[in-house]
Amino acid sequence: MSWLHLLHRGLWRRPLRTLLTMVSLSTAFLLMGLLVPILQLFESRGEADGIDRLIVQPRHSITDILPISHTRAISDLLGVTGVSHQSWFGDTFRDEPSSFARWAVPAASFFELHPELHLTTEALNRFANTRTGVLVGQKTAEQFGLKVGDRITLIPDIWLNKEAKVWEFQVMGVFDSNEQSADLTAMYLNYEYFDEYRAWGSGLVSYINVGVGTAQAPFDVAAAIDARFDNSADETTTSSERDFALGFAEQLGDVGFMITLILGAVFFTIALVTANTVAQGMRERLGEFSVLRALGFQLRATQWLMMGEVLLLVALGASSGLLISSLLLEWGRDYFAQLGGIGMNSLTVAAYHSADAVHRPAGCGPTRKATAQTLHRRSTTQVLTLRKL
């Protein structure tokens, strides 16, 4: 009889209990696999690696609007390779106001700064030369059955036009992208037409897009931009596109701390349940271990047998949970552009350990160290009981 056979028979001695314990462990590791990549994403805020575009927004509130004249002042700064802008359009499409994002952009400069958005030259020219033309993302086109030449009607909610009528546009092209961070649900309309036809706010934009050269540190450029408009009527705050997107989520609070707290509570609870289940199983099998000792098995061998069952149980639960979370992340990246390049790799568990050490303040509650001590105490109790045999 092999050791593997003994492990298998011991682990599945109570199939229902083993299965429920494994599901509990799998759920904990599933949450870890989903939340730790998000935690890593928030921890990467402020890193300069791979930044080639910046977002300039109003300093005091996202509801404020910047003058378009800021773009000319920014283009003169050292390290700036290109400048564009975008303005939130909103309005209602087919009674679905939040079905996809709608932006007013200048055709040439915006798509020059966003080469990851794939569009034919003919479609871009049609868009630039048609005042009421729009470009839609591949996912939106597929969702609503839109194609080149179709007409779109938007009911005003923020931006009323000068005739107090609905906005009417025509699809000039559909764009796609190979990058997962690209928003293929967006719609872009011609800023020149939007600015001329809207009832108020002429000459104002929501955000300014800035291209940064490789020879200049991006955060030096960001600091120079903000310094340029200090003490003016329209002060700015500049960040990378990634930090800009994460900033919206952080308006809810310290997301990193909340994720760490949730994971800590889940693992602490699951660890206690698992330890209690394993301890109960070992107590039920004291007679079996006595028989093994009587047959000549060494004490250390029976101890390793108990530990092996625990490790095998945890390994099965952890691997299934992490596998499911990896598949869910792959699916999520295909359907939610906001996830960007988020993903899970072999360093996820190690990254969570380091993140917990950074984010967990003193006195925030039970930690994995306490959980490990609990497991150690329960294992020690079983070993001492076995020694008495």
Image (cartoon, grey):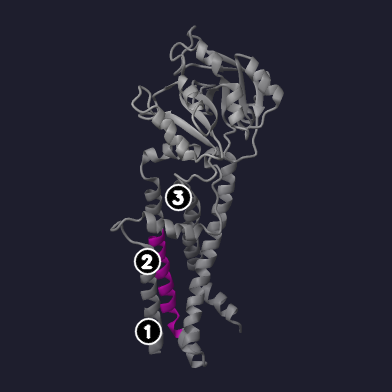
Instruction: Return the x and y of residue 199 as percentages of the image width and height.
Output: 45, 11
Q: Secondary structure at mark 3?
A: helix
> The residue under label 1 is which amino acid type?
Leu
Q: Earlier in the sequence, mark 3 or mark 1?
A: 3
- The answer to which of 17 and 187 lies nearer the viewer is 187
Q: In this rendering, would 225 be left or right of 363?
A: right
The residues colored magenta run: 267-287
Q: In this rendering, would 82 be left or right of 47?
A: right
Res 385 quadrant in image: bottom left
> The residue under label 2 is which amino acid type?
Lys
Tell me the CA gap for discs 3 and 1.
Answer: 41 Å
Q: Can residue 13 be seen in the rendering of this structure?
A: no
Instruction: Return the x and y of residue 256 as percentages of the image width and height.
Output: 40, 49
Instruction: Return the x and y of residue 248 as percentages of the image width and height.
Output: 42, 36
Q: In this rendering, would 180 be left or right of 375?
A: right
- The answer to which of 52 and 266 lies nearer the viewer is 52
Residue at the disc numbered 2: 369
In the image, which disc is placed on residue 384? 1
